[in-house]
Amino acid sequence: MIKNYQLVAILLGAFTSGAFAQNLADIGILSDTEDFDSSLPFTTTISTVFGYDSNVGSRPKFVEDSSAYTQGRLSGAYSTVRGKTHLGLNAGFATIYYLERDDTTFNSADGSVNFYHKITPRATFANKSYLSYSIEPDLQIGVAVPRRLSHYYYGHNNASLTYAFNRRLSSITRAGVSGISYEDETSAASNDKFTYNISQEMRYVLNVVSDVVGEYRFITSDYDVADYDYGAHYLLAGLNRNFNLMLRGTLMAGVQKRSFDNGYEDDWQPHLETSLRYNVTEKTQLSWINRFGYEDGELASNKATSRTGWNSSLNLSYSFTDRLRSNFGMTYHSYNFERPELIDLAEVMKTINLGVNYRLYSNIDLNAKYSYISMESDDVFRDFVRHRISAGMQIKF
């Protein structure tokens, strides 16, 4: 099992490293500093939630365990801009208590450090570090197993150096590390690993609305126990285009190939990433993101040599008034596990998220949320359906 102190030390010590997180939300972000917050004072947020979970452990339909729950979270955030340097800090701790279970209390925590510095008018350095302790799978990042197994640590450190040779030609160099470690020994044996990455991207501006991109990526994964260590090569090309002031699209397509230390080797296979981001009005924002290609989650536990996945995410936010806001999210994940010694395994996971937020006072929000997750698998013991509904309050100081 990966020691937790090793995970923390490598991720926080490797400040000049980076990682290609599988986060769907990162697809289509053209600059590694695009989502940096502007300077703001230190803020503290306290939130409380009361809700109901129809299937706490993401168990099969015939052994579901439901419970009401209450949750509290305390978080802090700070960002500053000093000349050419931006710094953002975030940290949070949460605890959830189930009213109708024997194992009643689960804690979680997360923290991040975002750093950005303009070295010269041509060169910019950015670094994003993230570390979390959780029991719920993070489907946006897509690293943890998509069902509750046990508490796990996850972290990544993303860094990049952007250099503009002239007004048309620029490059982005990235390198990095990410890691995951489960507390449960059975889960850890199949999933604990470190992943290391490097890439080189070249971007050429065709005109005021379009630029073309070429990229090479190399990824190597080192499993702690499972015999699934591998190296992977990606060759990609793409186009970024602003269709108008409100609509932006990106396309990256190419091939990828993996070679495992155990002797198995994948063929060259297609890899695709697309995104559309549309500011429909000042009150309405829409995004649609897709990714297709090889993935390495749950290979060992399913005795598979490869896993091909298509992931699609649709998100819509709408502000009814200055006080009342809403959001809607829907994801579709289709996986196919190739298993030479067994019948291939196919799975489809769907999620829906709905939320409403009402600004009661300048620093107090009321919110209500609903989420739905379903897994349909060729293996009936992996099927599950989960509904969660909650209402809460958030206070910011």
Image: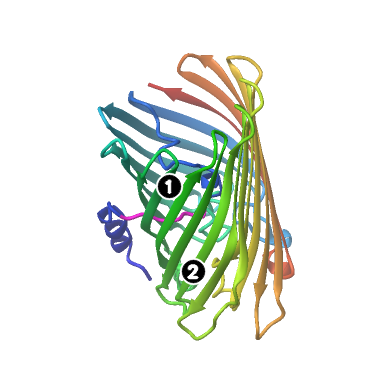
Left/right placement of residue 118 relative to residue 53 reads left
Note whether 156 is above or below 164 in the view shown: below
Q: CA distance from mark 2 to mark 1?
A: 35 Å
Question: Which stretch did the figure color magenta?
Answer: 17-22
Left/right placement of residue 284 relative to residue 174 reads right
Left/right placement of residue 152 relative to residue 123 reads right
Q: Give the quadrant of the C terminus.
A: top left
Mark 2 or 1: in front is 2
Looking at the image, what colour scheme do you see? rainbow
Kindly state the secondary structure of the residue where label 1 is placed: strand
Q: Residue at x 32, y 30 (%)?
A: 79
In front of the other: 235 or 23: 235
Tell me, yes or no, whether the highlighted magenta stretch contains residue 191: no
Query: For the stretch drawn in magenta, what is the main secondary structure?
Result: loop
In front of the other: 354 or 227: 227
Q: Amino acid at mark 1?
A: Ser
Where is residue 23 shown, x and y percent of the image?
52, 50
Q: Residue at x 43, y 41 (%)?
A: 94
Q: Amino acid at mark 2?
A: His
Q: Which residue is mark 1?
A: 108
Question: Neighbour class for label 2 at 10 Å: few (<14), some, many (≥20)?
Answer: some
Where is residue 252 shown, x and y percent of the image?
58, 53
Q: Which residue is mark 2?
A: 233
Q: Residue at x 54, y 75 (%)?
A: 300
